[in-house]
Amino acid sequence: MHNGVSVTQFIIEEQRRLPGATGDFTSLLNDIVSACKVISNLVNKGALVGVLGTAGSENVQGETQKKLDVITNEVFIKSNEWAGHLAAMASEEEDDIYPIPAQFPRGKYLMSFDPLDGSSNIDVNISVGTIFSITRCPEGVNEPTKEDFLIPGNEQVCAGYALYGPSTMLVLTTGNGVNGFTLDRDIGEFILTHPNMQIPADTREFAINTSNQRYWEAPVQRYVEECLQGKEGPRGANFNMRWVASMVAEVHRILIRGGIFMYPKDNKDPGKAGKLRLMYEANPMSFIVEQAGGASSTGRTRILDIQPEDIHQRVPVILGSKNEVERVVSYHAE
Ligand code: P6P
């Protein structure tokens, strides 16, 4: 028997700190945790259970859906629709919001999620993840609309991700710091292994898709160029670079050892504000990063302060070690 603290025990002990907590939130998180265990199992089995490859369809983003995009979306919805904690969900894989069906009770929370982020990596066996964000359904609203989801990220009550990597991890914040749990497959429990995760304020490691370099705005061009100039350049130090093309893996690396992750606005498609989606990628990851002492900005504004206009809205993302993010923001201000 493990002697570590399970995520269930941790959440219940957290809940005791919240005056008037009803256990509703704890139960919701347990349903999310169950869905992540199912997804971890599917991802780990991969080709053995025929879940690799494309589904032959496109999502609302116009992106080709992988079989696992569709399957994991279904898993997340089925695991979280029945218990009466949510009023509706919004998913990267669903065009519109998903109201809780009439046969189930509706609860006081809304959840936005990306069931399988980085899924372009799944066929090449590189880490992928699930990202989720929980907000309150407005008081008295029993028929939530898209507008009820469109609140700034600074009003999230919880954000988390599951990382399906060499080990499966769950990282959570409810606004009281960030904690990491590792799945012990022998007992099917997530065990607290990374309490109170903190991002170092400085770093010598940046993550960006450099193939877009010719499209970047000047402040990002300048920042990356200075990193590349290394010791002989204005930074007086050599930098390392990473690009996994799986945001969950990049953010997790930054939580563990620091770093800066950038998917900036670029002029490849001037009509697009960025690549990453605000509601179920940028907002939850920004809440986690800030709770771990990091920073997260579009380059011009704090991501958690953005007033959303659409559930699939895209934004530029520059997040990670506080001092590096602030440097990039200062270049935008010049
Ligand atoms: P690119 C995955 O599709 C994703 O949304 C993020 O997880 C990742 O950081 C980014 O897009 C990768 O984008 O253009 O490098 O494929």
Image (tube, rainbow, N blue to C red):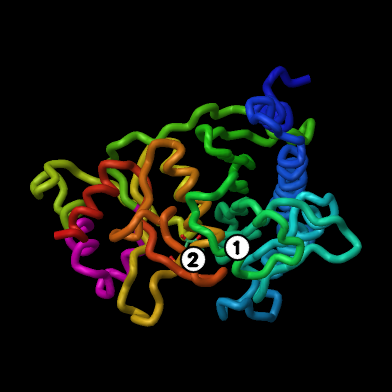
In reply to whether residue 313 is colored magenta, the answer given is: no
Label number found at residue 149: 1
Where are the magenta residues, as a range? 207-224
**Marks 2,1: beta carbons within 8 A:** yes
Write the residue at 25% across / 74% down: 214
The amino acid type of the residue labelled 2 equals Pro
- Badge 1 marks a residue whose secondary structure is helix
Type of amino acid under label 1: Phe
Which quadrant is home to the C terminus?
bottom left
- The residue that appears at 63% across and 58% down in the rendered structure is 113
How dense is the environment of label 1, judged by Cα within 10 Å: few (below 14), some, or many (20 and up)? many
> Of 37 and 307, which appears nearest the observer?
307
- How far is disc 2 from disc 1 in space, using C-alphas? 9 Å
27 with respect to 158 (left or right): right
- Helix, strand or loop for the magenta stretch, by majority: helix
Q: Secondary structure at mark 2?
A: loop
Describe residue 206's horizontal placement relative to residue 222 as left or right: right
Residue 162's x, y, as percent? 62, 47
Mark 2, residue position: 308
Q: Within the magenta stretch, is there residue 212?
A: yes
- Can residue 140 be seen? yes
Q: For residue 190, which quarter of the picture?
A: top right
Q: Residue furthest top?
A: 3
Residue 324 locus on image (x, y percent): 26, 46
Please say whether residue 72 is visible from this viewpoint: no
**How would you rate the neighbour count of disc 2 (Cα within 10 Å): few for under 14, some for 14-19, many for 20 or more?**
some
Determine if the C-beta at disc 2 is less than 8 A from ligand 1: no
Q: Residue furthest right?
A: 103
